Image (tube, rainbow, N blue to C red):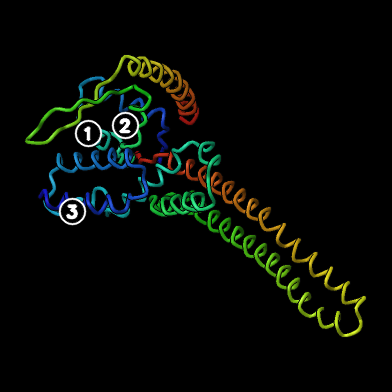
Amino acid sequence: MAIVIPNRLLDGIILSFIKRNNLYRRVITEQAKAFFGISEPTIYPVLRRLRNNRFLSVYSRPFQGRTRNYYQITSSGKSELKVIKKEWQIFSTKMNQVMGEENEQNN
Amino acid sequence: MNRIIDNYILQLKQYLIDLPNSDLKDVVQFYQEFLLDGNYHNEADIITELGTPKQLARKIMADYSVSVPEKEETQKTSSKSSLKTIWVILLGVLAAPIGIPLALAAVVVMVAVLIALAAVFIALAIVITSLFVSGVFILVRSFGLLFGGNWASGFFYVGGSMVLTCVSLLLFPIIMKFIRFLTAECAAFFQHIGRRIFKQRYYKVNA
């Protein structure tokens, strides 16, 4: 079975990762892969979109003679994440109610 | 190791040459850093993760082409750039995971639309050239009539041929405009389909 992850939730996933720690690109994509099996070419557009909407900001730090770009959540990113979280909670509660009831009937 | 990454990035850049400069820099920098932070031993490792430079470039281009706002896209487009958009999206859909039945259906629809579009182009081209050619042909032939005694029908045919030629010349810009409109609409339609496919992410749930 395959479940489609909508953009809204992808935003939520990435924002949550970065809210906990400022992360560089490799780590973000690896976490997304570890949790949901989302592949790298999916992550780039999400990060770009979040950055264009100013939910994320980028700063660079030198690392072994090159620069590494770290992502940081902005204040509007934090409030966006709150909204997504709320939406997801409402949706998942309903989903659980619906599927929970059906289970009981079947048993 | 760095040489392998440089090589991959260089190839990627070549396939992304159509991207606007700032976007190209951004995406290249992104993947460069991604690869440098990874633990790869050879090119095959990179390809398992990201695909070949060509495949990755197609995905990037496809994503880019559907992210450009439709309005902006259709306002100042030439047929050439519309056709390019169509082409890029088609390649991008082909690069999408085969497991998505939607992608397959989309490819079939897109190819059908392209064939229809080509048919319309060809039909219009035939109409306009046949009008023009027959106009000129009748004009040339009617000179014979004109000087051969039957001047009345000679004039009739000269007039008729001029009408045909002029109509074909007048129609030409209108048809060009219509073709431009049609390709722009097609590009918008492809963007619409592309968006539906690329904007959905699938992941397997093992229950």
Q: Which mark is residue B163?
A: none
Residue B152 visible in rendering: yes
Mark 3 — residue?
B7
Q: Tags 1 and 2 in contact by the CB under 8 Å rule?
A: yes
Q: Tags 3 and 2 in contact by the CB under 8 Å rule?
A: no
Are discs 3 and 2 both within one chain?
A: no
How crowded pointer 3 is (Cα within 10 Å; few <14, some 14-19, many 20+) is rated as: some
Dot 2: chain letter? A
Residue B45: give x, y in percent of width and height: 18, 52
Residue B89: give x, y in percent of width and height: 45, 49
Are discs 3 and 1 both within one chain?
A: no
Dot 1: chain letter? A
Residue B58: give x, y in percent of width and height: 36, 51
| Marks 3, 1: nearer the viewer | 3
Mark positioned earlier in the residue sequence (1 or 2): 1
What amino acid type should be assigned to the residue bearing mark 2? Leu
Mark 2 — residue?
A47
Kindly state the secondary structure of the residue where label 2 is placed. helix
Dot 3: chain letter? B
Q: CA distance from mark 3 to mark 1?
A: 20 Å
Relative to A71, residue A75 above or below: above
What amino acid type should be assigned to the residue bearing mark 1? Arg
How crowded pointer 2 is (Cα within 10 Å; few <14, some 14-19, many 20+) is rated as: many
The answer to which of B36 and B167 lies nearer the viewer is B167
